[in-house]
Image (cartoon, rainbow, N blue to C red):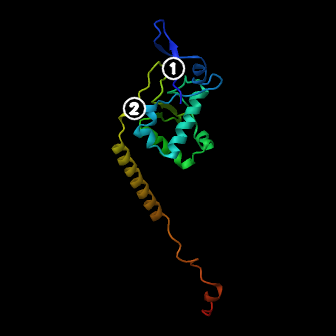
Amino acid sequence: MGTVSSKPDATGRSSGKQSGLISRVMKPPTDEPWIWLSRELLISPAWRGLSVNARKLLDRLHIEHMNHAGTENGRLIVTHDQFINYGLTASKVKPAIVECEFMGLLRFVRGGRWAGSNQPSTYRLTYLPTAHNFTRSTDEWRNVSDDEIAGWKSEQKQRQKLKTERCKKQIPTVTSRGTVPPLRVVPNTKTGSV
């Protein structure tokens, strides 16, 4: 395989700039939105430890980020229905948000309905800058270790197990078809006969 050539500077040494065809081919697309994910992020324990649902949640937020030309991070709005339409199961949206927050990949400000208003929840991807207030990425995912992730996942599994057990205790099991005796067994109250 050949080496990548670069333009020489005035002294004949490499300038580090790619030449010709390479510089045209090896650049982000100009005709569609794109998002930049660093190698360090992709090999981090936080990214590798994500569940399928958390990854889908982040993918949908990436799409929303690109829909706004990368200028709305920190004010990204994706509704519960939009997450579901993208492929998340309704009951897995909240756990995916909690997981992404624990991994340091996402910050979430919960909206709500009160006093006749409807405030949407907003999201911030910590590995991307926020353009509206000129803040660099906070990269909180760098502080999460494999051991912390394993402990958190174990704790979540235990919580789910306890929740399942509580639900099983609340649902009574049916032991018989009913308590009403068949008609032929009911005695006649006036005569006392069957």
Is 95 rendered above or below residue 35? Answer: below
Residue 179: numbered disc:
none
Residue 118 seen: no
Is 189 rendered above or below residue 122? Answer: below
| Residue 107 appears left or right of 146 | right
- Most extreme residue toward the top, as rendered? 10
The residue type indicated by label 1 comes to: His
Residue 49 seen: yes
105, 46: nearer the viewer: 46
- Most extreme residue toward the left, as rendered? 147
Q: Residue 145's image quarter?
A: top left
Which of discs 2 and 1 lies nearer the camera? The answer is 2
| Residue 103 appears left or right of 188 | left
Q: Residues within 10 Å of mark 1 (few under 14, many from 20)?
A: few
Q: Residues within 10 Å of mark 2 (few under 14, many from 20)?
A: some
**Residue at x 52%, y 14% (from the top left corner):** 7
**Residue at x 41%, y 50% (from the top left corner):** 156
| Residue at mark 2 to residue at mark 1: CA–CA distance | 19 Å
Residue 132: numbered disc:
1
The residue type indicated by label 2 comes to: Glu
Q: Quadrant of the C terminus?
A: bottom right
100, 180: nearer the viewer: 100
Residue 140: numbered disc:
2
The image position of residue 91, as x and y in percent, is: 54, 49
Point out the tag, 2 or 1, that comes first from the N-terminus: 1
The image position of residue 105, as x and y in percent, is: 45, 35
Q: Are marks 2 and 1 in contact (CB under 8 Å)?
A: no
The image position of residue 26, as x and y in percent, is: 57, 24
